[in-house]
Amino acid sequence: MRPAQALIDLAALRHNYQLARQCSGGKALAVVKADAYGHGAVLCAQALQAEADGFAVACIEEALELRAAGITQPILLLEGFFEASELALIDQHQLWCVVHSLWQLDAIEQARLSRPLQVWLKLDSGMHRVGLFPEQYQAAYRRLQASGKVDKIVLMSHFARADELDCPRTEEQLAVFNAARDGLQAEVSLRNSPAILGWPQVPSDWVRPGIMLYGATPFEQAQTLAAQLKPVMTLQSKIIGVRELPAGEPVGYAARFVAERPTRVGVVAMGYADGYPRHAPTGTPVAVDGQLTRIIGRVSMDMLTVDLTDLPQTGLGSRVELWGAQVLASDVAAQAQTIPYQIFCNLRRVPRLYSGQ
């Protein structure tokens, strides 16, 4: 059996959720969209079910998967609904719903519902993807209140640059949000992972931990609270072949690596078809039998190569950690000029094995 595996530590997931709660002092929706960032939404939600205040997903398909698996906590649809017909399922399954557009507000006013909805009213405070404009916000809130279709409204927005701790944009967005909600009596939700960890002064009755749940820092620099996160996924495989090459010999496609000295090359059963980033260059860290070394040459579809020259005790069958507790996913992502969000979400083909249930 091919040795490539993703080990998912659910105890670490719970630790990270608890850290989010401790940092915020409020209620936390565990963000499990995109199959829990590649970690498996159902099993991750089940692991958090006893303590989570609720969950957040992108769309109704993801919410219905959780309901079918027995998740009974509140589930928020972060993108709301895409067609008015979805309101029947939102009503049936008692889902919470973001409203970010006036057409969604129109649809709620016209809907036939068995019970009032809980709506999270989203303001575009400067992210400029979705959300009501500040001049629309108070009128939309009053319309929802007057509709008779809504039980509770949470006021929300989303920060564009909270992962940049010295950037004034977060404070600017907070000022826009506070002005738009002036006089409205409702709970608020502003803090995503970087804001939970790095912006304690931002008020937020509800927080929305995403990437921090999975143990990856959202910051490019060291940060005290982020250092307390525990990696949830260990992507691992084994050495399946060893080559001894003289100086001057190339390795892999396009000869991106040429040995400068006699080089011992280990071939690993892991490639971009598994989700490992193809653009990870020579020098990207990897651990073999617990010892740090580097990738050499171009990542292939099913295999990549590592430098074993200074690790003479390693060889066929040696365990390789591509990312995890020793090789941080954020470091691999930085080498590949991407972010840990993407490399987690790109995981495919590799079986996931769970512990810490």
Image (cartoon, rainbow, N blue to C red):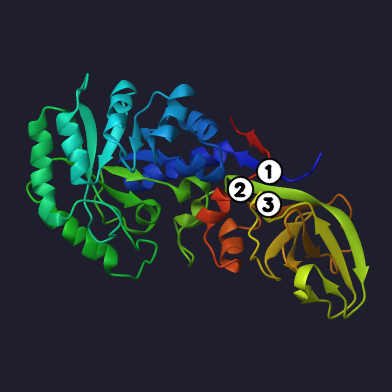
In the image, is residue 118 above or below residue 266?
A: above
Q: Residues within 10 Å of mark 1 (few under 14, many from 20)?
A: some
Q: Nearer the viewer, residue 298 or 189?
A: 298
Residue sitting at the far top: 114
The location of residue 208, given as percent across then percent down, is 36, 45
Label 2 vs 3, first from the N-terminus? 3
Q: Which image quarter is the C terminus in?
A: top right
Q: Secondary structure at mark 3?
A: helix
The kind of residue tagged 2 is Leu
Q: Is 272 left or right of 311, judged from the image as shown?
A: left
Q: Secondary structure at mark 2?
A: loop
The kind of residue tagged 1 is Val
Q: What residue would you read off at disc 3?
A: 273
Discs 1, 2 touching: Cβ within 8 Å: yes
Marks 2 and 3, how far apart at CA: 8 Å
Q: Is 353 left or right of 21, judged from the image as shown?
A: right
Q: Secondary structure at mark 1?
A: loop
Q: Exactly how many numbered labels are in the figure?
A: 3
Q: What residue would you read off at disc 2?
A: 347
Q: Nearer the viewer, residue 287 or 335?
A: 335
Q: Is residue 168 visible?
A: yes
Q: Nearer the viewer, residue 127 or 88?
A: 88
Q: What residue would you read off at disc 1?
A: 350
Q: In percent of the image, x 56 and y 60: which residue is there?
A: 330
